[in-house]
Structures are given as C-alpha cells and as structure tokens.
Image (cartoon, rainbow, N blue to C red):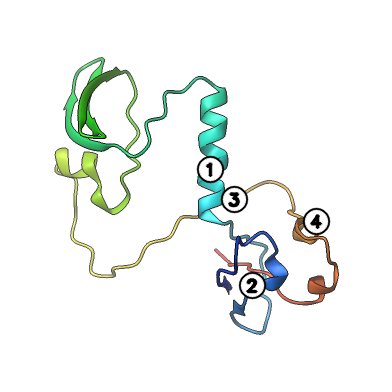
Amino acid sequence: MRFFYSYRDNRDITQRIELGPSTYPASKSYQLDRGRFENALIKHCLKLGIDFQASCKIKEISLGKNDHQITLLHNEQESTLQCKWLIDASGRMGLLKRKLKLAKPAYHDVNASWFRINHEIRVDDWVDEQKWVMGRICRVPV
C-alpha cells in the first residue's frame, strides 16, 4: 500500500509526499481518495433523487416489517423519516449492527474497504505533468 500525504487542496498528486514499498505487487489494485469518492457518490445519489441527509445525528431507528422509521437531529431540530431501505453508513458506530445485536468482538482493530473493477485505470491521466508517471502508484494485491 502506498500513502500520499496531504498537500494544499490535494489536486496535484505530484506535489504530495509518498510513502510505500519500492517494489510492485503482482496483481493490479487501486486506492481511491475516500473523501473525493464520497463527494462523487453524494452528487450521484442526489441526481437520482435520493434524499441524502448530511450532518445529522441518528436518535432512534425503528425497524418495521415493511417500512422503517428514523428519528434524526439536525441543527437541534428533530425530524422523522420513513423508508423502505436503510443503509447503515455509520462506520465504526455500527448503529444497525448494535441495534440488531450483531456485534462480535474484534481482536485486530484495523479497518479497510476494497472493491474491484473490470477495467484498467489510467492514473497517468489524473495529472497534467507526465514526469511523475516514472514513479510508483498505490496497488494493493488482494
């Protein structure tokens, strides 16, 4: 795995300090900027008409047979939503996991998310300068 430390607005990867091994792994893998990915995902959801609620605190989750009810707090104002599908994006808090008593002890306290795509990513298209291409990129064998 390679780490690229923050530099200004992080738009130019060639200006970010890089830390990682000096050899390439055998399989192709890629690492994405989580913040940028989340922002793109939010924009996509909004285009699809999905009701995205940001900066809220979940006060209560009531799971029903067909529909669910969520009580949330936003700017000290409480509101209630009804939904057919509920996606728990609370991370380590695991609100649904705790509510459903699905939590299991974890003795190795680390986290990561991975996915595979069916085509090659051309990271050399991500920056204007081509001299950085002679360096290394993050590829993690899975």
Where does the image place residue 62, in percent across and percent down from the top left? 16, 25
Q: Which residue is mark 3?
A: 116
Q: Which residue is mark 1?
A: 39
Residue appearing at x 23%, y 39% in the figure? 96
Counting residues from the start of the chain, the first of labels 1 and 2 encountered is 2
**Left or right, residue 91 beside residue 14:** left
What amino acid is found at the position of numbered circle 2 in the picture? Answer: Arg
Q: Residues within 10 Å of mark 2 (few under 14, many from 20)?
A: some
Q: Secondary structure under badge 2? A: loop
Q: Nearer the viewer, mark 4 or mark 1?
A: 1
Q: Which residue is mark 2?
A: 16
From the viewer's perspective, is residue 44 above or below residue 137? above
Counting residues from the start of the chain, the first of labels 3 and 1 encountered is 1
Q: Is residue 42 visible?
A: yes
Residue appearing at x 53%, y 43% in the figure? 39
Mark 1–mark 2 distance (CA, rounded to whole Å): 21 Å
Task: Point out the residue furthest to the bottom here.
Answer: 22
Of residue 73 and residue 18, the one placed in the foreground of this image is: 73
What amino acid is found at the position of numbered circle 1 in the picture? Answer: Asn
Counting residues from the start of the chain, the first of labels 3 and 2 encountered is 2
Where does the image place residue 98, in percent across and percent down from the top left? 17, 44
Mark 4 vs 2: CB contact within 8 A? no
